Amino acid sequence: KAGVTQTPRYLIKTRGQQVTLSCSPISGHRSVSWYQQTPGQGLQFLFEYFSETQRNKGNFPGRFSGRQFSNSRSEMNVSTLELGDSALYLCASAFSGRAQYFGPGTRLTVT
Amino acid sequence: GQQLNQSPQSMFIQEGEDVSMNCTSSSIFNTWLWYKQDPGEGPVLLIALYKAGELTSNGRLTAQFGITRKDSFLNISASIPSDVGIYFCAGRDTGNQFYFGTGTSLTVIP
């Protein structure tokens, strides 16, 4: 069974721009979560989607948004990028109530 | 958000030695997970625990779900150089949200 895939793997953007990241979960997994990982803050939870509905949300500004499609694929959008948004963005999928499996991440650099 | 208390923060050990690390939480968790992360990659699931008291092994790795449901430990026996990396614990609370430890950086000296 294929693992979680994320595209793109690397991105360089300029302050003020917006970015969209994509995540394809493991087949059969309906829960998709997004995390931001930085050296100083560790893994920070952004939001979780389940069956196209946002089920949980972390403590991030409204510039961070997401959505999930009927095939469970998910996208995350960050608008008006700031330097501090530079991070590894991780997507994780899970079968109901079970362990999360992570993708390889998207490395976002904001200049 | 809540973060788990994971210790130690870093370990430097000789090849062949055993390793032990643990995680504690102020909240009750329904699931404990242990991951290993290499630089620039996503965390890889090592062991998943779903019941209090559960003890599970994966090769040289053994993890236990604490009986109070507020802690978990991971042991690595006979460490080898490829065990190098950062190990994270994660717990899922009754609201179905996951929380992560701050990581244990493991260095194995050949």
Image: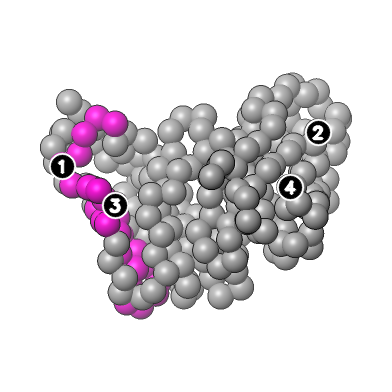
Task: Indicate the amino acid at tag 2.
Answer: Val
Residue A64: in magenta span: no
Circle 4 or circle 2, nearest the eye: 4
The answer to whether residue B105 is left or right of residue A110 is left
* Gap between marks 4 and 2 measured at Cα: 17 Å
Image-based side of A72 in relation to B7, left or right: right
Mark 2 residue crowding within 10 angstroms, few (<14) / some (14–19) / many (20+): some
Determine if marks 4 and 2 fall on one subunit: yes
Which element is circle 4 on?
loop
Q: Nearer the viewer, mark 2 or mark 1?
A: 1
- Which amino acid lies under the numbered mark 1 shown in the image of this protein? Ala
Q: Earlier in the sequence, mark 4 or mark 2?
A: 2
- What is the spatial separation of the Cα atoms under label 1 and label 4, in whole angstroms? 40 Å
Residue topped by disc 2: A19
Cα–Cα span, label 2 and label 3: 39 Å
**Residue at the image position 59 percent from the left and 66 percent from the top:** A96
Which residue in the structure is indicated by mark 4? A73
Q: Report if residue B72 lies within the magenta region.
A: yes
Query: What amino acid is at disc 4?
Result: Arg
**Left-right relation of A56 to B7:** right
Q: Residue at x 80, y 23 (%)?
A: A14
Q: Quadrant of residue A8?
A: top right
Residue B31 % position (x, y) = 46, 67
Between B99 and A101, the residue placed more toward the observer is: A101
Q: Chain of mark 2?
A: A
